[in-house]
Image (cartoon, rainbow, N blue to C red):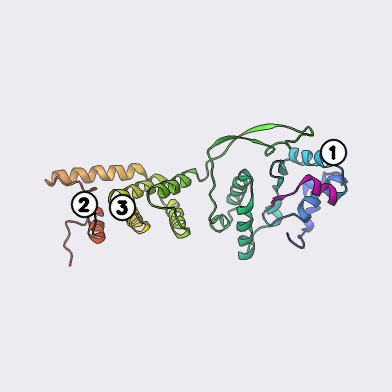
């Protein structure tokens, strides 16, 4: 909880604010400056707290929240009692390391994961430092679920009820697939390993990273260093997609057959143990070169 919140003077000249009634202006200002506000604009705000701090009764509070949901300025989750203010970042841009660290910490405490996805899209749109803001946070998307009290209305026993079906946009489902595949076949990724996976994901397709993990498993070289060596090799050959790698493998296999070798170039190792340097040379296609 902050001791104060900044109020920009342009707030009062904002086109939306100009058209609000005095009661709505007061309530909107309250939502952006009350004792529960956070740096990211998502925070827990029970209806009872709103009643106590504004002096409004429950009926008025629900009416005003419903109205601002209709204005598409907020979302409210009755189950987690969390509120999200859409225009928050407009007046509170995280432009220094302390605010970025603060938001990263707050994001990890948000219970409604749908709110996190919306923030992710918003920050991407504004071209903010996504890597630091969402460090250590998985964004699960591309799943079809039903949320109550999230998108359009408050869901509670007092009457304002609606159920909205939400289909999430694809943000990082594939990245989550890679991390899950890594966890199942290598180990639970530590922060460094997770960052490396994310770095590679910004350069090549997710499927290619999974293929590199499969190579590590195949040759019993289950570590991030080996996976990166494979990825570096493919990256140097401009193999950015799964199809690129598959075509490269086929061409490699054809060349080996034409050279009269019966050895599978992608299985050049006794499964019981391996010489890392020798394996690396063979996997990268250097087995026929002279080594000093």
> Percent from the top left, x then y, of residue 18?
82, 47
**What residue is pinned by disc 1?**
59
Residue 237: give its label: 3
Question: How far is disc 1 from disc 2 in space, using C-alphas?
Answer: 73 Å
Could you tell whether 250 is left or right of 1 in the image? left
Q: Which residues are magenta?
A: 41-52
> Percent from the top left, x then y, of residue 259?
13, 47
Q: Residue at x 81, y 51 (%)?
A: 30
Q: Is residue 25 visible?
A: no
Residue 48 lies within the magenta run: yes
Q: Residues within 10 Å of mark 1 (few under 14, many from 20)?
A: few
Q: Nearer the viewer, residue 7 or 228?
A: 228
Residue 217: give its label: none
Quadrant containing the N terminus in the rendered view: bottom right
Q: Nearer the viewer, residue 118 or 185?
A: 185
Q: Nearer the viewer, residue 14 or 65?
A: 65
Could you tell whether 95 is left or right of 20 in the image? left
Q: Residues within 10 Å of mark 3 (few under 14, many from 20)?
A: few
**What residue is pinned by disc 2?**
270
Question: How far is disc 2 from disc 3 in space, using C-alphas?
Answer: 27 Å
Tag 1 secondary structure: helix
The mark lying in front, picked from 2 and 3, is 2
Could you tell whether 166 is left or right of 194 in the image? right
> Percent from the top left, x then y, of residue 222?
34, 54
């Amino acid at each position: 909880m902050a001791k104060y919140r900044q109020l920009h003077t342009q707030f009062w000249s904002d086109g939306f604010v100009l058209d609000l009634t005095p009661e709505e202006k007061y309530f909107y200002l309250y939502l952006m400056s009350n004792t529960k506000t956070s740096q990211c604009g998502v925070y827990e705000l029970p209806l009872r707290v709103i009643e106590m701090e504004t002096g409004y009764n429950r009926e008025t509070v629900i009416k005003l929240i419903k109205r601002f949901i209709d204005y598409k300025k907020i979302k409210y989750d009755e189950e987690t009692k969390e509120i999200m203010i859409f225009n928050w970042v407009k007046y509170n841009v995280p432009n220094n390391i302390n605010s970025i660290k603060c938001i990263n910490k707050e994001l990890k405490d948000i219970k409604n994961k749908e709110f996190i996805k919306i923030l992710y899209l918003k920050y991407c749109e504004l071209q903010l430092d996504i890597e630091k803001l969402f460090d250590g946070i998985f964004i699960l998307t591309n799943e079809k679920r039903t949320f109550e009290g999230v998108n359009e209305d408050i869901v509670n026993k007092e009457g304002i009820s609606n159920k909205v079906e939400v289909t999430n946009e694809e943000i990082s489902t594939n990245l989550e697939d890679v991390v899950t595949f890594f966890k199942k076949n290598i180990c639970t990724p530590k922060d460094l390993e997770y960052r490396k996976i994310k770095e590679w994901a910004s350069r090549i397709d997710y499927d290619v990273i999974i293929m590199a993990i499969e190579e590590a498993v195949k040759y019993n070289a289950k570590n991030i260093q080996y996976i990166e060596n494979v990825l570096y090799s493919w990256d140097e050959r401009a193999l950015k997609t799964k199809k690129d790698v598959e075509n490269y493998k086929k061409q490699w296999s054809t060349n080996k057959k034409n050279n009269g070798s019966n050895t599978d170039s992608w299985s050049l190792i006794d499964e019981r143990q391996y010489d890392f340097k020798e394996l690396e040379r063979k996997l990268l296609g250097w087995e026929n070169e002279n080594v000093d």
